[in-house]
Image (cartoon, grey):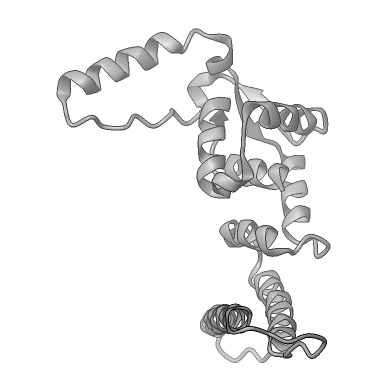
């Protein structure tokens, strides 16, 4: 999933390693524990595979500067960032190649990796899929949630359930039901857009 996230972010713009790590943490969330120790091996694998390539630092998106609310502080941050540019690590930037875009598309449509975390990540890059592929992706999620909801509503009979366990099971069922309604809404929106974009006189 890390390679999928890397390719998805580089599909938008070339990035320095530091900025890529920052955006990966924002995209994947803190539980993934993205570090340079995990990022750079993934970058080397993708580079060896021809999916990404190094570019000049000037072509990469600059790292964001967090405003301090003080003109003096902001100027100091900008000067510090400029001084850091000659360093080897900050000079290295990456961009996706045509082969990388093809691999990215394959990872996005891979049905073998559709757990909760994979779904959330793929959904964040869903705009890169064709409409029919987006609907198929959402339909697969709907099937998963329907099966999960059916399973969560079965009351275990092998042992007695206290009210706390029962409350937890009910909460899970409600959460799954909410997610299912959300997916139904997304599917309806996708289908409505397909009808809107269909040429006049065309049939399904």
Which x, y percent locates residue 100?
A: 73, 41
For residue 13, above or below residue 182? above
Which x, y percent locates residue 195?
A: 56, 85
For residue 133, above or below residue 202? above
| 103 and 175: which is toward the camera | 175
Which x, y percent locates residue 128?
A: 62, 58
Q: Residue at x 83, y 62 (%)?
A: 112
| 49 and 2: which is toward the camera | 2
Which quadrant of the structure image shows residue 175? bottom right
Which quadrant of the structure image shows residue 180? bottom right
Task: Judge left or right: residue 11 versus residue 49.
Answer: left
Q: Residue at x 66, y 92 (%)?
A: 203
Total count of labels: 0
For residue 79, above or below residue 54? above
| Quadrant placement of the C terminus | bottom right
For residue 135, above or below residue 103? below
Which x, y percent locates residue 176?
A: 61, 79
| 5 and 172: which is toward the camera | 172
Q: Residue at x 34, y 29 (%)?
A: 65
Which quadrant of the structure image shows residue 173? bottom right
């Amino acid at each position: 999933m890390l390679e999928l996230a890397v390719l998805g972010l580089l599909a938008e713009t070339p990035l320095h390693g530091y900025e890529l790590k920052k955006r990966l943490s924002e995209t994947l969330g803190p539980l993934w524990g993205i570090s340079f120790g995990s990022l750079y091996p993934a970058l080397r694998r993708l580079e060896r595979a021809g999916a990404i390539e190094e570019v000049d630092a000037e072509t990469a998106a600059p790292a964001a500067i967090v405003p301090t609310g003080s003109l003096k502080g902001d100027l100091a941050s900008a000067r510090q960032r400029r001084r850091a540019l000659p360093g080897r690590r900050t000079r290295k930037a990456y961009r996706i190649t045509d082969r990388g875009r093809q691999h990215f598309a394959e990872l996005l449509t891979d049905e073998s990796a559709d757990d909760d975390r994979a779904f959330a990540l793929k959904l964040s890059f869903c705009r890169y899929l064709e409409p029919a592929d987006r609907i198929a992706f959402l339909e697969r999620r709907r099937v998963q949630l329907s099966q999960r909801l059916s399973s969560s509503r079965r009351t275990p009979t092998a042992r007695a359930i206290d009210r706390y366990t029962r409350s937890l099971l009910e909460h899970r069922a409600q959460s799954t039901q909410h997610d299912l309604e959300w997916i139904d809404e997304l599917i309806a929106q996708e289908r409505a857009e397909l009808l809107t974009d269909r040429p006049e006189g065309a049939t399904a």
